[in-house]
Amino acid sequence: MKRVYWGNVAGVGPVLKGFYSDADDPLTTPDTATGKFFFNSNIQTIGYILDIVAVSPDFVTYPAAGGSGLNPNRYYLPAGTDEDNCQIRISSWMNDGNSFQVFAYYQSWFTATYGLSYLPLVEYRLALDYVTNKFRGPYLDLRQGQATGQGKIFSWSGAISQMFIDLDSGYDSGAGANRASVKVGALTSSGAAPPTSRALMSVYALPAEADAIPNFAGNAVSGQEPIRISPSMFRIALPGYTVADTNLDHYIVHENKVPAKIMRSGSVTVPALGTVNITTRLPMTDTTYMDFLCKKSSEATYWNPPFIDSFNSHANDFTYTISGSTLTIVSTCDVSIDILYVIYADSGDAYTTGGSKVTVRASDAVGEYYQIKRPGSSDAAPGLNDILFDTRLSYLPILKEGFLNFPGDFPTDISGGSDRFKGVRKATVTVPNPQGLALFPKCGSVYNAPAPQDYDEPRVMWQHHSIFVNVGSDSGKSAGGSTWINPTSPTSVDIYTSGNQPWAVANGSYSSYNAQLKGVRYYIFGVPNSL
């Protein structure tokens, strides 16, 4: 049976801890025993994803008629802003009877919406079928590899996480005002089924660049009231703060602080061309997706994105569909694959009302659970948005995170050997992981600012790896912008970067970014198997 403890611990301050076993003492179990906790506020937050935003094209409010690919109709939000100061730019156009739309989100939108002082890690996933909540898994893009003299192949993780400088995004303000944006593309077509595509954009409470993760904890003060549970309030403040504080960042739990949920985490093996169902104890929403690492069962370790080494690489293809409490994985790969997964869900539903309970101990078809929910929410059927903490959910600790400067923090030069398809330099990170949790790493390239007048230059590029093929002596080299991260054991992770390699080769002519690589940001999560 799981155990939940909260209290104001002498010398530490307020804590919320969840244990897999009743036998573990909440006052004596060290924080370093990460595998004994399913949650520990001393080393993690309840959720690292602030929001999962559904991005859908709207051709009524933002018409495409009259726009073209080279000169789209442009719309700016909030109302009254323009290309220089908008938070979102929507571009709409027509081509061969199809309507297209792209949303560009600038850092100012993330600041205004979430109060962030840094550029957050942002990922988006395009639905293959938004009606059935169908998404694709990892994939190889081999199309460019067909072109002799300018070939390149890509490995993608299923999510896109990039931010590039936009042309004319600050044009009227003069050179140097161009801004970077996250661009989310969607389209509609009268001949398509379904006719409209949809994307889910996840916003992490984690910096995408070199910024430190904000630490809002202070020092515990005797006599403060950091914890209050009442019919109108459930608050556990961080050390140094009281329940009267109005800043939600100063709380471990607050009735108005509701991050996205992890519905389940773990690993599965999917047989060749097979199907596997994963069930969650709580029903999933239409803003649910699966994050994953994937490898062939014959491979020893995971890579993010999946491993490729040549034009003949074999893709680990699968799709997944979400319905109710079931996520169905369908493999299109003709060999067995292993998937390490984390299922995230959010809800935009209104809060429920009419209840009197704040803490709930009950049982479902699987067993007993303990829940903390918003005061006043429904006792019989609280929504996902009402749940503050629940033992049926998963909680991931960050076991290691940091920023590696290029080239100084990458001691191993691999640019001239057989491993050059992995990158030009390698670093190895040691991970504290005493209970041997499965490692789920992410990393991305971070760039110094380019020349003031530049555009189409990267600011960040996460979870992207590409390799040159069919380009003569440069074949087999990693292309610019690429990173790779590979957990080689439960306590060690290799991180690769392509440095300032060209991003394109065309018949002996090289194209490189003017922006120079600053380094690589990484996060290494520990994934428990859901119980």
Image (spheres, rainbow, N blue to C red):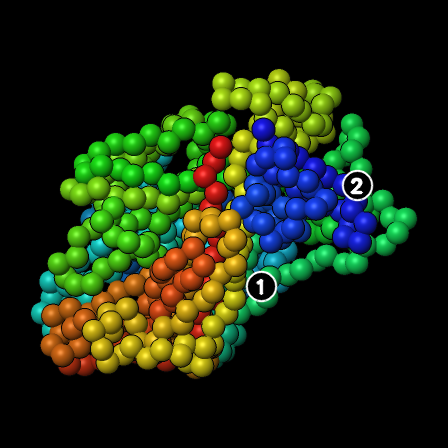
The residue indicated by pointer 2 is 227
The residue indicated by pointer 1 is 118
User: Quarter of the image containing the N terminus?
Assistant: top right
Residue located 35% across and 57% down the image: 304
Note whether 165 is above or below 288 in the view shown.
below
Residue located 30% across and 63% down the image: 465
Secondary structure of the residue carrying numbered label 1: loop
Q: Where is residue 491 in the image (x, y as percent from the top left)?
A: 45, 59
Q: In 3D space, how far apart are the residues under numbered discs 1 and 2 (Cα atoms)?
A: 29 Å
Note whether 74 is above or below 425 in the view shown.
above
Q: Can residue 214 be seen in this view?
A: yes
Instruction: Identify which amino acid the numbered label 2 is placed on.
Output: Ile
The answer to whether 530 appears left or right of 153 in the picture is: right
Instruction: Identify which amino acid the numbered label 1 is placed on.
Output: Tyr
Residue located 11% across and 70% down the image: 470
**Residue furthest toward the right?**
223
Q: Position of residue 416 (x, y in %)?
A: 24, 80
Secondary structure of the residue carrying numbered label 2: strand
Q: Can residue 463 be seen in this view?
A: no
